[in-house]
Amino acid sequence: MEENNLNHNLEFNDIPEGNNADMYANFKEKLESVQTFPGLYAFKFILTGGVDKIKELREVLPEEEFIETPSKTGKYISITVKKWMQDADAVVDIYKKVGEIKGVMML
C-alpha cells in the first residue's frame, strides 16, 4: 500500500460550517481534489471518554489497526487509523458514522 498522498493539506475542520449535507458534500469535493482513490487514507480522531469511546469507534472500523496516542494529561486519546479506501464516498460514509459518536472529534 502506498502512503505517498495521505490526506495532504486536508483536515475535516477545513470544511465550511453549514448543515450536515453541505458539510459532507464540501468535504468530499475537497477530498477528491487532494486524494487519489483507490488509496490509503489516514483517519484521525481525538477521543474523550476513554475506553468506551474506543469501543464505539472500533464498531465503525472493526478490522483496522488503531494507533493510539494518549495526551500528556491523559484526558484525550489521539487515534489514527489507516484504511484502504475505494473512493471519497466511502471515506465520507465512515465520517458520518463516527460523527454520531459523542466525544469524538474528527480531524
Image (spheres, rainbow, N blue to C red):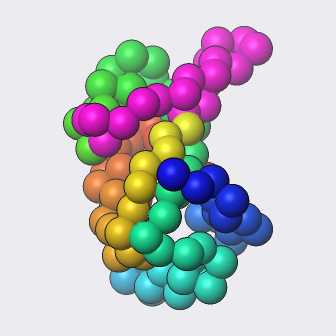
- x and y percentages locating residue 45 in the rendered image: 54, 42
Q: Is residue 86 above or below residue 78?
A: below
What stretch of residues is rendered in magenta?
61-79
State the residue lying farthest toward the top: 73
Q: Is residue 52 above or below residue 56?
A: above
Q: Name the residue located 43 percent from the left edge and 49 percent from the top edge.
A: 83
- x and y percentages locating residue 31 in the rendered image: 56, 76
Query: On the image, which quarter does residue 15 sit in?
Result: bottom right
Q: Name the residue located 43 percent from the left edge and 70 percent from the top edge.
A: 38
Instruction: Report the front residue among 30 and 104.
Output: 30
Query: On the image, which quarter does residue 99 sit in?
Result: bottom left
Left or right for 16, reference 20? right
Magenta segment includes 41: no
Question: Is any atom of residue 5 visible in this view?
Answer: yes
State the residue lying farthest toward the front: 1
Instruction: Report the front residue among 8 and 60.
Output: 8
Q: Is residue 9 above or below residue 76?
A: below
- x and y percentages locating residue 35 in the rendered image: 59, 73
Magenta segment includes 67: yes
Left or right for 91, reference 97? right
